[in-house]
Image (tube, rainbow, N blue to C red):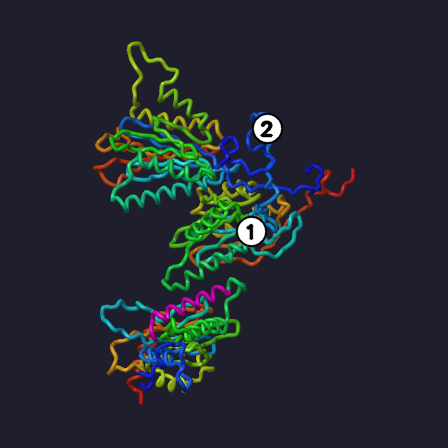
């Protein structure tokens, strides 16, 4: 037993002065001998960028591009970041793509288990989101997080559902949500168009709005791609679109000094 | 039963002098006392049907199902002790799920049947356990197409075009043999399955019964589901009609 | 290393906490308690949502406000509610307020070495019918008080409350003393003013305001029922009464 309260809670350290022979202010700064050992903190490796989602008249709509980056390298350009869960839910993920794949496998297993029980009950978007937040929060509490920000959207019993969960287990719900750079670049555009107008927003409006935001993001986010997909969930179920191409115009760059090809 | 009193039937780990394991044969007797279960493998899917005997009017209709779902694409019907059947189906579910976990793909029927067969067989080896008192019909659709198997209490498993276990299996097999499985559609198979279950049900000896049917194949997008109520009622109606004109 | 070498392993620590902003506040009257919180949830300079409740009804006479790291807060409220449900199943009655306060201390201290990064304020009616506020630090130190503000705008609101509720730096008129308790209408005005002011000066406060009012059994709600945007949550007409009052706050 160490009877010196000033030593309590400090890491074990053979170099430290175990008997407190020096006054506190004269003791050498303790060095944590384990600082270079036991590292399970990870960092994201192959990453996906923003996911955007909004509520609209008939349900919810979500968009994510098809890029998985390796640092600044555009490594995989045909990756799907939207995933259907059960019959009335879709999830979209930014952050580490291997963690996201683990989450997909996990959710698929839960959905299959629920199906094989054969009691006619299946998981809706609220249940999927609750489950996911428990998983994310428990992993962060083990200091071994799943490095993602995930949007969960769905439509069930005539009700829209749209919510967020991230690597810390933080959750919230809103009429429009975006992860990553989308939270800075797309959210102002989305809030202006969606807030207070959810019940008027048609599917065409919603689609056009997300298309515009994806284009703005492609112009400004260096980790984005001009190829993306849209998921819609409404009374007719979950539908994930084919790949959509963004047309962009870079001609404005010609006239800007320092942006284009000029050397002077 | 010549086996009784010989002392060779007290344990699954004991052979009789002529090379039989009586405990396994007794397990088969348990299956023979059960309501009939049949399976049909046709060109675009599999249909399972069970004659569920109702031993009490107090039972809730459609309770105590004898057809279960193993995975999205696999169904299982059991004959014999229902509780044993449920245990086997639980094992089958675990096998199917662990296959998904390991290979990120739906299990083939052959894989699940082999694994469950191995498990059932292990219960014929030890004096401390009792072999399963149930035969299970496992049907589904995998990457090779529709498939249908039966696992017996001995652990042996065979693939079939048409399978029947339980009380009325002899008559059911005779009827199944008349069918052209490679030409039948799932919808036609539903009608045939209902007809056979109604036919083999012995009105004179047995109590009431409930027809339980499921299917998996093109009609259901490869998902194992209960046959829809309207289709089931229609098949039952036709079955009763056919019964009056039979023979 | 500054020289870019990897002579020593690099360490990038995962930080399991964040601050989601917002402010909560509770004031006890003689026979009522007011517990309030804004509904903005933010991270950094971003507003995540304009409606994420921070104030929760626990029993017919207890309300808990939670502020700090939202994920911890939601989990903590979930666990407190679960413990209160178990108590109901075991004892066929609701847990008294002072017992909930001690329960919260125990639950917070149980996480002493990986704390819930959450400031709690518990408000409600005590068994003797008096209004009560309990405030907690993240590891469970707590005390009963007449009023408390916590969260992002604590430093803006608490001094105002000290002045208006405790009459700090105020002199009573000659021959008179300060009242021990204020009437409900005064308290509500102070609460609303506190939040509108905090909204003006603090970027993490705003969007919406939810004010819970618990009034002791048999006491008058002092005209509260007739105010706009009031909803009564009482489960029994003859017990303590609970109301929720909603107000908009500026969204900028």
Q: Is residue B169 magenta?
A: no
Looking at this rendering, what residue extends furthest in the right direction?
Answer: A264
Q: Looking at this view, is C236 or C65 the one in front?
A: C65
Above or below for A210 versus B190:
above
Above or below for A211 versus C49:
below
Do the residues at discs 2 and 1 belong to one chain? yes
Q: Looking at this view, is A48 or B23 the one in front?
A: B23
Residue that mark 1 sits on: A64
* Any part of residue A12 in sight: yes
Above or below for B19 versus A200:
below
Eye-nearest disc, 2 or 1: 2
The disc at residue B117 is none
Looking at the image, residue C229 sits to the left or right of residue C196; the answer is: left
Q: Is residue B84 magenta?
A: yes
Q: Looking at the image, tell me whether mark 2 or mark 1 is earlier in sequence order.
A: 2
Residue that mark 2 sits on: A27
Q: Quadrant of residue C198?
A: top left
């Amino acid at each position: 037993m160490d009877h010196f309260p000033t030593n309590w809670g400090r890491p074990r350290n053979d170099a430290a002065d175990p008997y407190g022979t020096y006054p506190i202010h004269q003791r050498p700064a303790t060095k944590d001998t384990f600082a270079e050992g036991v590292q399970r903190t990870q960092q994201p490796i192959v990453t996906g960028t923003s996911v955007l989602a909004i509520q609209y008249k008939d349900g919810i709509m979500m968009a994510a591009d098809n890029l998985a980056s390796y640092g600044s390298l555009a490594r995989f350009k045909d990756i799907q970041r939207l995933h259907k869960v059960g019959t009335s839910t879709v999830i979209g993920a930014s952050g580490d793509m291997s963690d996201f794949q683990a989450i997909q496998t996990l959710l698929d297993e839960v959905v299959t288990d629920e199906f094989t029980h054969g009691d006619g009950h299946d998981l809706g978007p609220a249940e999927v989101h609750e489950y996911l937040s428990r998983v994310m929060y428990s992993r962060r509490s083990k200091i071994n997080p799943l490095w993602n920000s995930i949007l969960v959207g769905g439509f069930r019993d005539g009700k829209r559902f749209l919510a967020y969960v991230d690597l810390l287990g933080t959750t919230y719900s809103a009429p429009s949500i975006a992860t990553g750079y989308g939270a800075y670049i797309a959210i102002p555009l989305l809030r202006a168009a969606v807030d207070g107008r959810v019940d008027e927003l048609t599917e065409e409006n919603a689609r056009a709005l997300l298309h515009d935001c994806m284009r703005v993001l492609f112009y400004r986010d260096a980790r984005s791609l001009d190829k993306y997909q849209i998921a819609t969930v409404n009374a007719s179920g979950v539908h994930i679109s084919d790949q959509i191409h963004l047309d962009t115009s870079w001609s404005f760059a010609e006239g800007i000094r320092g942006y284009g090809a000029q050397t002077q | 039963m010549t086996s009784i009193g010989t002392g060779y039937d007290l344990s699954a780990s004991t052979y009789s002098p002529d090379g039989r394991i009586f405990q396994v044969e007794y397990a088969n007797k348990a299956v023979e006392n059960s309501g009939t279960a049949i399976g049909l493998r046709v060109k675009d899917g599999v249909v399972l049907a069970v004659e569920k005997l109702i031993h009490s009017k107090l039972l809730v209709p459609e309770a105590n199902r004898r057809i279960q779902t193993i995975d999205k694409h696999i169904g299982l019907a059991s004959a014999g002790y229902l509780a044993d059947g449920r245990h086997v189906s639980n094992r089958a579910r675990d096998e199917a799920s662990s296959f998904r976990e390991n290979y990120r793909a739906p299990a083939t029927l052959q894989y699940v049947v082999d694994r469950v067969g191995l498990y059932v067989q292990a219960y014929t080896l030890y004096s401390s356990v009792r072999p399963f008192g149930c035969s299970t019909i496992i049907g589904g659709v995998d990457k090779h197409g529709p498939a249908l198997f039966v696992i017996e209490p001995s652990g042996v498993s065979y693939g079939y075009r048409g399978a029947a276990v339980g009380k009325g299996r002899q008559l059911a097999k005779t009827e199944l043999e008349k069918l052209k499985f490679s030409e039948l559609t799932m919808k036609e198979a539903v009608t045939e399955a209902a007809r056979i279950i109604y036919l083999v049900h012995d009105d004179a000896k047995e109590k009431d019964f409930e027809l339980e049917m499921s299917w998996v194949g093109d009609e259901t997008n490869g998902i194992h589901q209960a046959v829809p109520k309207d289709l089931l009622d229609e098949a039952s109606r036709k079955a009763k009609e056919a019964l009056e004109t039979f023979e | 290393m500054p020289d870019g070498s990897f002579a020593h392993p690099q360490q990038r620590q995962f930080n399991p906490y964040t601050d989601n902003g917002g402010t909560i506040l509770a004031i006890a009257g003689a026979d009522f308690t007011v517990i309030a919180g804004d509904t903005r949830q933010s991270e950094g300079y971003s507003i995540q949502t304009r409606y994420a409740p921070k104030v929760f009804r626990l029993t017919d006479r207890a309300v808990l406000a939670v502020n700090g790291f939202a994920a911890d807060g939601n989990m903590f409220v979930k666990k407190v509610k679960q413990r209160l449900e178990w108590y109901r199943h075991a004892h066929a009655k609701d847990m008294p307020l002072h017992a909930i306060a001690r329960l919260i201390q125990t639950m917070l201290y149980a996480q002493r070495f990986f704390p819930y990064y959450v400031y709690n304020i518990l408000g409600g009616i005590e068994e003797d019918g008096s209004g009560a506020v309990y405030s907690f630090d993240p590891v469970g130190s707590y005390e009963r008080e007449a009023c408390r503000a916590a969260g992002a705008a604590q430093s803006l609101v608490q001094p105002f409350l000290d002045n208006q509720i405790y009459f700090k730096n105020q002199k009573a008129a000659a021959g008179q003393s300060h009242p021990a308790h204020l009437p409900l209408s005064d308290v509500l005005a102070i609460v609303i003013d506190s939040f509108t002011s905090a909204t003006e000066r603090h970027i993490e406060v705003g969007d919406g305001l939810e004010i819970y009012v618990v009034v002791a059994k048999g006491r008058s709600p002092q005209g509260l029922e007739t105010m706009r945007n009031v909803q009564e949550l009482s489960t029994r007409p003859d017990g303590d009464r609970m109301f929720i009052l909603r107000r908009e706050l500026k969204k900028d």
